[in-house]
């Protein structure tokens, strides 16, 4: 894959996935694979957690952003990067840019939570606020890119971003193999599909018998509808769920191309189930997992997955949430 | 060290420490060493976390209990184990006994939190409740040991228990070396001293230039007073701190023998500082750390440690707390 400024709209190749692992080595945290004895006892199979909440910036997003930036030609990279995001992608891009010593401009809605704006600024990024009602973030981003020559880092529909997220899948497969087990099922939160696509491609390469499942917010089940109809379906509303990190308009061109034939099933998770999973994570697993990041855990806890005896791995994709949301989750227990 | 039922009251040898690592391999979680970029930036040195809250049963206690039980002669082991504890040690012993398929009896005060009693039972242990006001847990334990032949697993003043906790220190030293850094300082919560003693002995073997620091609850600063006076001092009161996991009457015979010459300094941490550290852990580090388990983190956050440029590692020793305490910690942020 040529390291050009503009993304080629094709799927990452096996060589691209290997290159991503080399690029993020020493930059991203190789998060551990943790046993979950309580869930293993309930499900009568070995269950493990992949806690990407422990990744730099508190979510897996750092991996894709890091690979995207690392793969840029130095002359392009020096001009900086730009991204639109009110959440985990913003912090991932900001921290990766800081690590490479380049400028990052993040376009965020002016009504984004203070904590997320401050979090993004804490990684040295310039935050440009816009009014959701009267301004277009695309227009603002295009103007910034034109003025500065900065490269846009998309949140998910990009081969370098997908390849970056695939490193999670390779780490999982290797860690499961290292303890002498067979990976049977992998469950992930599912939004725009960058993480799920990376996991799917890693499984295809390294553990082709492993099945991939997704978990998306109930009422925002575009992936399930897309699989059922065989064509990309959209969410018409993008607010109103505490699983905010999973609220994308739809799968992307690339992520749909990957996932349409590589998802064994997709489960819908209610906000109550996601909050309960966050509370379980905090009190039992000892991990802070935001409700969207806990969607796959919620699906497992409610028995959505088919039974099996091989290893089941649950991706906990992020842990960035306000204290009030965590307190709300705890109050329900 | 002979594998007898009764503990020899001597310090574990280097061979004992190596044996402990072999015994807990595949049983205890080799917890990761996690970078803490935010703390590293503030302190201008590489800072890492050793999250024993991710250990089986949610605290480091599993390691010592596992080593103690694994080292028993099979004929003694078959008769089971007994322990007194209202907290993390109870769950560590119960889970280790369950793993070896032997009976565990845990003597707990009848006013212990329901969550801890249920947690201990969830690992298959028999819980014997006693009335703090009218009954002696020692007498109850002695009767159980006499009736059943069960071996007592002490919470900290035991060479096998100390050797089990030392495995944390060896893992830290190896993980720091693997990324090409020099371990300069290690900070740990300090109660009865089993964990601190294990860390001290591991440092002595594997990183003799590394300094060990302890953090204990303000108002229960027996370790600092012991170091200052050169003799074991006691806490006269054992209730009234949210750092309950660190409230021991005093250091033990063995732990004092180890620590009197191997602690660089001990810091007092207030409950407010410990709760703030728990909130920081939950929101920023994405880890659930009980206030006592966060004492070393609290000491670092308030700038108690001397400056340095080598790697600083903070042990987060446990994460078992009621939802109400975590909510209390979050409400202060």
Image (spheres, coloured by chain):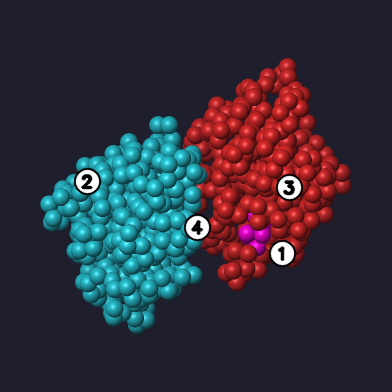
Chain colours: A red, B cyan
Specify the label residue A160 is tagged with.
3
Task: Say which residue appears at 29% left-offset and 48% top-offset.
Answer: B215
Sort mark 3 into few (<14), some (14-19) or many (20+) by Cα contacts within 10 Å: many
For marks 1 and 2, give the one nearer the viewer.
1
User: Was residue A73 drawn as part of the magenta stretch in this picture?
Assistant: no
Q: In screen coordinates, is B8 left or right of A96?
A: left
Location of the C terminus of chain B by quadrant is top left
- The quarter of the picture where residue B11 lies is bottom left
For the question of whether residue A253 can be seen, the reply is yes
Cβ atoms at labels 1 and 2 below 8 Å apart? no
- Please tell me whether residue B52 is drawn above or below residue B278 in the rendered image: below
- Please tell me whether residue A35 is drawn above or below residue A248 in the rendered image: below
Whole-percent x, y for residue B160 in the image: 31, 70
Label 1 belongs to which residue?
A206
Inter-mark Cα distance, 1 to 2: 53 Å
Of all chains, the one bearing label 2 is B
Q: In screen coordinates, is B306 left or right of A236?
A: left
For marks 2 and 3, give the one nearer the viewer.
3
The residues colored magenta run A168-173
* Circle nearer the N terminus (3, 1): 3
For marks 4 and 3, give the one nearer the viewer.
4
For marks 1 and 4, give the one nearer the viewer.
4
Specify the label residue B179 is tagged with.
4
């Amino acid at each position: 894959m040529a390291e050009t400024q503009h993304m080629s709209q094709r799927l990452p190749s096996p060589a691209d996935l290997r290159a991503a692992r080399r690029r993020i080595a020493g930059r991203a945290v190789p998060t551990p694979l943790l046993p979950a004895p309580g869930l293993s006892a309930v499900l009568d199979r070995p269950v493990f957690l992949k806690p990407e909440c422990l990744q730099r910036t508190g979510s897996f997003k750092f991996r894709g952003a890091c690979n995207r930036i690392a793969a840029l030609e130095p002359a392009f990279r020096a001009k900086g990067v730009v991204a639109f995001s009110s959440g985990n992608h913003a912090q991932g891009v900001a921290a990766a840019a800081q690590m490479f010593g380049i400028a990052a401009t993040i376009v965020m809605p002016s009504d984004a939570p203070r904590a997320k704006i401050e979090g993004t600024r804490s990684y040295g990024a310039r935050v440009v606020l816009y009014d959701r009602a009267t301004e277009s973030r695309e227009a603002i981003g295009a103007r910034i890119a034109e003025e500065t020559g900065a490269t846009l880092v998309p949140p998910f529909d990009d081969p370098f971003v997908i390849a970056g997220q695939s490193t999670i899948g390779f780490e999982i497969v290797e860690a499961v193999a290292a303890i002498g087990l067979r990976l049977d099922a992998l469950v992930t939160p599912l939004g725009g599909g960058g993480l799920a696509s990376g996991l799917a491609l890693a499984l295809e390469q390294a553990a082709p018998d492993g099945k991939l499942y997704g978990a998306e917010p109930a009422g925002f089940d575009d992936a399930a509808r897309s699989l059922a109809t065989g064509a990309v379906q959209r969410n018409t509303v993008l607010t109103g769920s505490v699983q905010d990190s999973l609220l994308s308009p739809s799968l992307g061109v690339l992520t749909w191309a990957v996932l349409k034939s590589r998802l064994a099933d997709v489960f819908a998770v209610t906000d109550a189930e996601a909050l309960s999973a966050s509370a379980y994570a905090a009190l039992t697993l000892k991990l802070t997992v935001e409700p969207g990041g806990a969607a796959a855990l919620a699906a497992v806890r409610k028995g959505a997955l088919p039974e099996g005896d091989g290893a089941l791995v649950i991706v906990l994709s992020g842990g960035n949430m306000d204290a009030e949301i965590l307190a709300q989750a705890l109050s329900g227990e």
